[in-house]
Image (cartoon, rainbow, N blue to C red):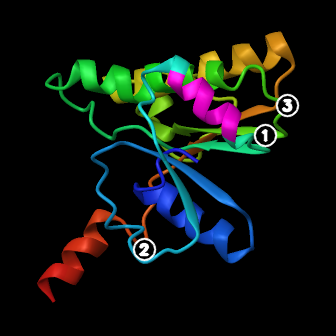
Amino acid sequence: MTGATGFLGSNLTNYFLSKGYEVHSLIRKNSNLWRIRNINDINFHVSNLLDVHKLKSTIKSIKPDVVIHTAGTIKGFSEIDQEDVITSNFEITLNMINACNDLDYTAFINTGSAYEYGNKKGNIPENEKTEPVNLYGITKMASTSYSSLIAKKYNKPITTLRIFTPYGYNDLLHRFCLLYT
């Protein structure tokens, strides 16, 4: 699991641990653990997702059956943090997929975004044309495209889930409500 300290990842980590699965989480050296501080039984691996050689070694030692990649950033709606958005949403996805190339995993779940579709109204069918209107959507679309390419080219079980406006326990609003109530 990547992104276990984020909103989606922390909820997924909680869920899988409650079902009795063994969960390994790749975290940054300076990760903020507030979302998972009360969760027990996580196997943490401090890792730099940009260092593909060390990443490959770490993943090889874990030998995951399923890889869930939720790491990334929600920035990208302005032009301020372009490099960080490209690195966080595209480069680390490439590195994760490439680091898992030699593994015989049963599933690799990548998280995409509704922002890949751009400004659409009403229900959006899954095969709708993607037309992102900001860097965040572009980097998520690029990650989805790369994931799809590797899945087809090497017959790998890689799936991207395009997430639409998630909210709930452990999102930032919940945190602020806890701090100010």
* Residue 74 x %, y %: 33, 41
Q: Tell me where residue 170 sits by quadrant.
A: bottom left
Pointer 2 with pointer 1, Cβ within 8 A = no
Q: In the figure, 11 relative to 104: above or below?
A: below
Asked whether 52 or 108 is in front, the reply is 52
Q: Is residue 60 magenta?
A: yes
* Residue 159 x %, y %: 72, 35
Q: In the figure, 69 relative to 178: above or below?
A: above
Q: Secondary structure at mark 3?
A: loop
- Residue count near mark 1 (Cα–Cα under 10 Å), binned few <14, some 14–19, many ≥20: some
Q: Which residue is mark 2?
A: 169
* Residue 51 x %, y %: 44, 21
The stretch in magenta equals 54-61
Q: Which mark is residue 107?
A: 1
Q: Which residue is mark 3?
A: 104
Q: Residue at x 37, y 29 (%)?
A: 88
Q: Is residue 36 magenta?
A: no
Q: Secondary structure at mark 1?
A: strand
User: Which three-letter amino acid code belongs to the residue tagged 3?
Assistant: Asp
